[in-house]
Image (cartoon, helix red, strand yellow):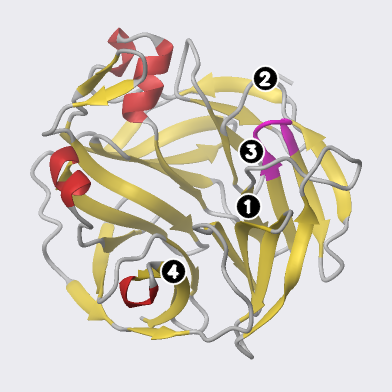
Amino acid sequence: MTVLILVSIYSCNENNVFDFSRNIEKIHGELIDIDCLIGRQPVDFTYIDTLLFFHDRYEQKLITIVDIKNDQCVGRYASEGRGPDEFLAPLRLFSSAQDKLLYCFEPNGGYVKLLGLPTMKTQRKILLQGDVSWVKKTRNYFVGFSPMEEGRFQLYDLDGNFLQRGGEYPFRGNEMDVMTAFALYQGSYCANPNEDYFAIGGHYCNSLEFYEIKNDKVILHKKYEIADAKGQMNNGVKFDNDCPIAYAYAYGTEKYCYMVYIGSTYAEAKNGTMPRKIRIFDWKGNYIKSYEPDLNIYAFCVDEDHHCIYGIVRNEQNKGEFEIMRFKM
């Protein structure tokens, strides 16, 4: 199957003067006192019905499940290893509320594994062609991100067949070698699990892009380009002290794209924990509002039915341990 990806801009192509300081609401976090320890910093939160899933490498297990209705740990799953029913860390987790499946992507193996609930048994394995570092799933596609000679992302069908490359790096990205461009302009990715939308927010440049896949074409709906990355590759990435630190984490629901925004410089981020806001957009890229949590959220997922954000925070009063908090929206 051949798919032509056309990137077109309609709505607003670049917005360097948009004011995100309006419509900001403070939210308060309440501790979820679950009956299991959290290991290393958990990431890749996702949510199905009343179950919260996250990648937490703990005692040779890679996925922790929490029942947030009863605030208790359901268990730890996904043994680490190379066996037929084992998984290679790290994992990228995402879910589909429609098919009630947990999707686990293994960057080191190239497989997307579909796990059924509540057994957590692998129902299907999909091999994505080519080298992929991150994957997000829309309704009808997988979108993969990795260093590549042309484009910024790769489109796959749901059987893992490569379709086409699309997009381009912001600012000076197309002038750089592949690894430098990927290091400076990689981002936080999220997708709409029930429709064919996805978004990219830059870690080290203040850029944000919103895409839709429609009639076998990828359409760029809206782009915010505010501040370029500052750094170079020299035995690794060397960031300038005034390099912007922007979008740190993202989560997509059927209604909205949620982006954690830091808004500091590299020097400021090295010297202390910077306050974080959660910016909310519709899938055409229109800014809705921001939440300002009373604690810094590192990873999160959203339950829009019950108006809650479930986030990981670091408890500095408890030896810097990570805890799960519930924030009412």
Q: How many marks?
A: 4
Disc 1 + disc 3, Cβ < 8 Å: no
Q: Residue at x 17, y 33 (%)?
A: 243
Give whichever of discs 4 and 2 has the lower sequence position: 2
Image point (24%, 67%), residue name: 289
Q: Residues within 10 Å of mark 4 (few under 14, many from 20)?
A: some
- Find the distance from the CA under tag 2 to the CA under tag 1: 19 Å
Q: Is residue 179 visible?
A: yes
Callout 4–callout 3 Cβ contact below 8 Å = no
Disc 3 versus disc 2: distance between alpha carbons? 13 Å
At x 52%, y 25%, the residue is: 146
Task: Say which of 297 and 291 sits in front.
Answer: 297
Please state which amino acid type lies under the numbered disc 2.
Gly
Q: Are marks 3 and 2 in contact (CB under 8 Å)?
A: no
Identity of the amino acid at label 1? Leu
Frontmost of labels 4 and 3 is 4
Which quarter of the image is occupied by the C terminus?
A: bottom left
Percent of width and height locating residue 94: 62, 54
Residue at image mark 4: 321
Residues tagged 4 and 2 counted as in contact (Cβ below 8 A)? no
Tell me which label, 1 or 4, sits earlier in the chain.
1
Label 1: which residue? 93
Amino acid type of the residue that numbered disc 4 sits on in the rendered structure: Glu
State the residue position of label 3: 142
The circle drawn on residue 130 is 2
Residue stretch in magenta:
105-111
Query: Is 99 contained in the magenta span?
Result: no
Sequence-first tag of 2 and 1: 1
Q: Secondary structure at mark 1?
A: strand
Position of the N terminus by quadrant: top right
Residue type at numbered disc 3: Phe
